[in-house]
Image (cartoon, helix red, strand yellow):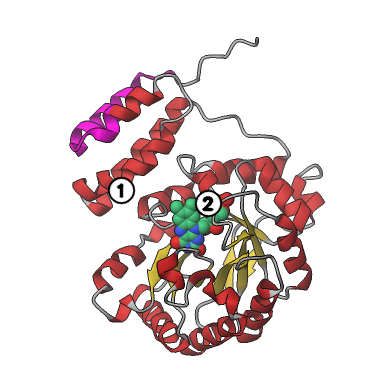
Amino acid sequence: MADSPWSTLGKPAREFNMGQLKLNGRVFLAPMAGYTDTAFRRLARRHGAAMVVTEMVSSRALFGNGREKSNELMEFTEPERPVGVQLFGGDPKIMGEAAKLVMDEVHPDVIDINFGCPVGKILKCDAGSAILKEPQRAGWIVEAMVKATEGKVPITVKTRAGYDAMDNAVFEVLEAVEGAGASALAIHARTRSQMFEGKANWDVITRLKQKAKIPIIGNGDVKSAEDAYNLFRQTNCDGIMIGRGSMGSPWIFEEINHYLETGKPMKSPSLKFRLGVALEQLQCAIEVRGERMGLLEMRKHLTHYFKGFDGAKEMRQNLLTSNDPEWVMKSLAEIQASLPAEDPAVPVA
Ligand SMILES: Cc1cc2nc3c(=O)[nH]c(=O)nc-3n(C[C@H](O)[C@H](O)[C@H](O)COP(=O)(O)O)c2cc1C
């Protein structure tokens, strides 16, 4: 399409190679511990995310008494494919063994490494963004994982712009993991010390892309289709990942794909549509995780779905304090059914 933003970005919209894996799009769901559970990942895929990733799993726990919890975190359903399992750990040998185990037992399409988590207990195991203090070790870890999996599954990494400062460390990580056989690098454009504060610095993504031989996936602060276009345009990155912008709105991937393909914004989803998606997610969470856990896991998602409309606060208060899954499901279904197909027009002031 002549006026498609993709034509100005100079990339084929629906082609993205991650090693031997061919993906049908360039916009991915970012891994988020406690959020990107199987129900949410399924919805993100159905609403246009080209790939999804599990919550992070400890490589050590796979060989110890955290195995049961790890199995839960790694569990995914076929409609989620292509799906990556994200591992964290600092020991190349254990990460290699963990990658082999995950490949043989779970069969994901990608194994991703978390080199970005800023949380103290992860840093203490030399994992997450601790790698930015010793970029060479990133290469050793990737090398061990590529070797252990015999190149049969793409190994990708996700990291941050720096540890305390935006220095050279992330470029050294890129060089090390590229040399060791990583298939892509995703970059959350904040330092470890920034946590999630301040604005993401997309310049780092631009500079990484200029140096990289492997695909670079930009991440940080994309909350709309326009942000997505700007991130591609400003940085020339190969793909993008959306985290918080998808909470309570997994259709954001569709909105971005539509905008990039047509140059036009998609019509805003009605409240009926939005609560329909929430209901579907609740049904899926209960189906997969059982009534009690499904409802518990869904509470934080419902907080995001019930925002920004009249009466949202009261509905949130009722639905989020009930321990009765059947009642919550019934009430949500009734609210959704009672809504008009289209939102009433807002009078122009
Ligand atoms: C609640 C939460 C949990 C997260 N968990 C992970 C994780 O397990 N692994 C990871 O690589 N990044 C994790 N992240 C970081 C996100 O993947 C992403 O890099 C970050 O939120 C910036 O992107 P955004 O501005 O689109 O949210 C998490 C972020 C949030 C908000």
Judge whether residue 323 is colored magenta: yes
Q: Is mark 2 within 8 Å of ligand 1?
A: yes
Seen from the viewer's position, the closer of residues 89 and 122 is 122
Q: Residue at x 65, y 57 (%)?
A: 14
Q: Residue at x 29, y 24 (%)?
A: 334
Magenta span: predominant SS is helix
Could you give the CA–CA distance between mark 1 and mark 2, rounded to whole angstroms?
17 Å
Q: How many marks?
A: 2
Q: Amino acid at mark 2?
A: Gly
Task: Residue under label 1, please give it.
Answer: 297
Kindly tell me whether residue 31 is visible in this rendering.
no
Kindly tell me whether residue 254 is visible in this rendering.
yes
Q: Position of residue 198 (x, y in %)?
A: 62, 49
Hey, which quadrant is residue 180 in on the image? bottom right
Q: Amino acid at mark 1?
A: Glu
Check disc 2 and report its element: helix, strand or loop: loop
Which disc number belongs to residue 8? none
Judge whether residue 190 is colored magenta: no
Q: Which image quarter holds the N terminus?
A: top right
- What span is colored magenta in the figure? 318-340
Task: Residue under label 2, please give it.
Answer: 243
Left or right of 10? Residue 258 is left
Q: Residues within 10 Å of mark 1 (few under 14, many from 20)?
A: some
